[in-house]
Image (cartoon, grey):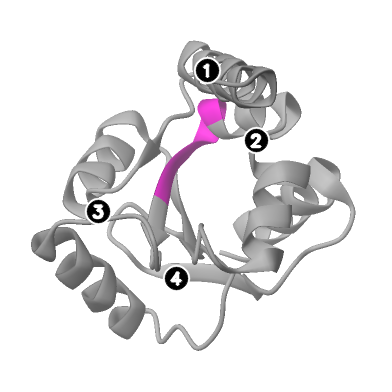
Amino acid sequence: MNLAKLVRIACLTAVFAVASAMGAEWKTDFAAAKADAKKDGKLLFLDFTGSDWCPPCMQMKKDTLDKPEFLEFAGKQLVLVEVDFPRRKSQTAAQKKANQDLATKFNIEGYPTFVLATAEGKELGRHVGYLRGGPDALMAKIKEWQQAK
């Protein structure tokens, strides 16, 4: 294994450790996420992504979604749900179907699409495409959607 690969693995491990410590884990099971949101009095934040082929999705993850500021904010008030449509990563048939069902339910037409929803799954707001401005811009948008509910 080369040094660059080891560094990437170490960085990813650190990001997941930070996210886990802050209580902001990305879930893939929507039913479980809804139950957690209801139990904890939080909202759902869905990231419809093409994680391994969509350049704006990958950039958004790097610039915003993996940043400690966003993960800390999310850990306090959101249940994070990744709805992924990869081309190279494998997924179970059940996960593919569940993700497609969510894309249909929320009428997803492009990636990335971010949706804020209640614990019952009612949409409060959405943003399609890369959002400039890092964590601060996304957190401001989420707060705006929360106030509009």
Distance from disc 4 to disc 2, alpha carbons, whole Å, reads 23 Å
Q: Which residue is mark 4?
A: 123
The residue stretch that appears in magenta: 75-81
Q: Which residue is mark 2?
A: 66
Distance from disc 4 to disc 1, alpha carbons, whole Å, reads 32 Å
Tell which circle, 2 or 1, labels the residue nearer the N-terminal end.
1
Q: Nearer the viewer, mark 4 or mark 2?
A: 2
Q: Residue at x 63, y 62 (%)?
A: 57
Residue 51: percent from left, percent from top: 51, 58
Distance from disc 2 to disc 1, alpha carbons, whole Å, reads 12 Å
Q: Is residue 88 left or right of residue 100?
A: right
Q: Residue furthest left?
A: 94
Q: Nearer the viewer, mark 2 or mark 1?
A: 1
Q: Residue at x 22, y 48 (%)?
A: 29
Q: Which residue is mark 1?
A: 13
Mark 4 neighbour class, 10 Å CA radius: few under 14, some 14 to 19, many 20 or more = some
Amino acid on which the number 2 mark rests in the picture: Asp
